[in-house]
Image (cartoon, grey):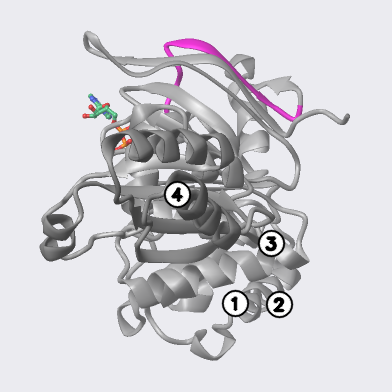
Amino acid sequence: MSEPILRLDKVSVQFNDTFAVKDASLTINEGDFFGIVGPSGAGKSTLVRTVNLLQKPTLGKVFFEGVEITALNKKDLRQTRLKIGMIFQHFNLIKNSSVLDNVCFALKAAGAPKDEIKKKALFWLDRVGLKDKASLFPSDLSGGQKQRVAIARALANEPKILLCDEATSALDPNNTKEVVNTLKEIKSHYPITVLFITHQMEVARTLFNKIAVMDSGKIIEQGLCYDVFANPQHEITKSLVSSSWHLELPHEVFLHEKELFVITYSGNNAYEPLISKVSRDFAVQVPIVGGKIEYISGKPLGILVIGIQGNAENRTAAINFIKTQARLDRLTYKED
Ligand code: ADP
């Protein structure tokens, strides 16, 4: 196996007497679309900023392509940073420069040959679908378009890895979709690695192949995105995953059913035979009150909200049986 593109080894960041990041270790391989998720204040931004040393770790090491960048001198660090692109929540475009000049600026700053600058900038604006907006100014653009300019600017120097710090968090759902689709499209054509931090689980499950979950400065869980959504382990992850399904049901349903459950089943596990088997073998009724199928990394994940009606003994036996066949969680009522 080739060298990982990025490796964080027990990275901690301390501000005053608190740790924003504590003992975080991550390995990101070339081609990964790696997401770090977690609630606000979990330490995601601080962690991602250690990758290009915008934030120096208090403890721990950062390796980029096998080289410990936490030990580099200023000159070598500058060179390495050229291989690390970054986009931000608030785009950070230069207001008084045109879209084209914003992208050209990054190329000039990196010392690109003069005669190539405009051509390259237009190429990347074309890649993000904004070549026809080259002469406009950032204020003429929607949020999604501004972020696409920022993507063109970040990729113009052909970095090895693109860091995205809450890149869709300031955008409405349509603009978010636009940026997500742009990143997916670029990723399908270029061998770029992406490290994306977000508190938006909906963005996480559409984009990432791997995911790490952070809480209170620590990485509490990591794995393939599909596996983390299908079978979250930590309580925080369970809660983030569960609220991302948007299974809010009207209060009346909860009044009608004693208890509601969420069955999560992976694509090859069809739920109909399970539901009918449970009703038949355990003499319970299993009304289906909600559900959907989500696709994560191209694989289906079924989410079904059910009630289980019958006498206590049968219900317990039915619940225990379902747990041997699929993931089963209690659904609690939440006000919209
Ligand atoms: P997230 O990106 O997950 O929302 P952050 O990395 O921004 O979390 O912040 C993690 C914690 O570190 C928060 O409690 C935040 O207030 C604190 N923090 C972040 N930056 C600084 C700083 N420069 N000085 C002091 N505390 C900070």
Viewer-nearest residue: 325 or 52? 325
Disc 2 crowd rating (10 Å Cα; few below 14, some 14-19, many 20+) is few
Label 4, secondary structure: give it: strand
Kindly tell me whether mark 4's CB lies below 8 Å from ligand 1: no
Q: Is residue 10 above or below residue 301?
A: above
Distance between the alpha carbons at the discs numbered 1 and 3: 15 Å
Looking at the image, is mark 2 or mark 3 nearer the viewer? 3
Q: Residue drawn 31% across and 60% down?
A: 246
Query: Which quadrant of the figure contains the C terminus?
Result: bottom left
The residue sitting at 33% across, 84% down in the picture is: 140
Labelled pair 2, 3 in contact (Cβ < 8 Å): no
Q: Report ligand 1 position as a quadrant.
A: top left
- Image quadrant assignment for residue 106: bottom right
**Residue 174: which quarter of the image?**
bottom left
Q: Is residue 55 magenta?
A: yes
- Mark 2 and mark 1: Cα distance apart in space: 10 Å
Say which amino acid is labelled 4: Ile
Q: Residues within 10 Å of mark 1 (few under 14, many from 20)?
A: many
Q: Which residues are magenta?
A: 54-65
Q: Nearer the viewer, mark 4 or mark 3?
A: 4
Q: Please give the residue where the numbered disc 3 appears in the rendered image.
A: 187
Q: Which residue is mark 2?
A: 119
Query: Tag 3 or tag 2, which sits nearer the N-term?
Result: 2
Please give the name of the residue rendered at 62% of the width and 14% of the height, measured from the top-left corner: 71
Decide which of tag 1 and tag 3 comes sooner along the chain.
Answer: 1
Which of marks 1 and 2 precedes in the sequence?
A: 2
Label 4 sits on residue: 263
Q: How far apart in space, not on screen, are marks 4 and 3 (Cα)?
A: 33 Å
Which numbered disc, 1 or 4, marks the residue that appears first in the sequence?
A: 1
Count of numbered circles on the image: 4
Give the residue number, with chain letter if any, for mark 1: 125
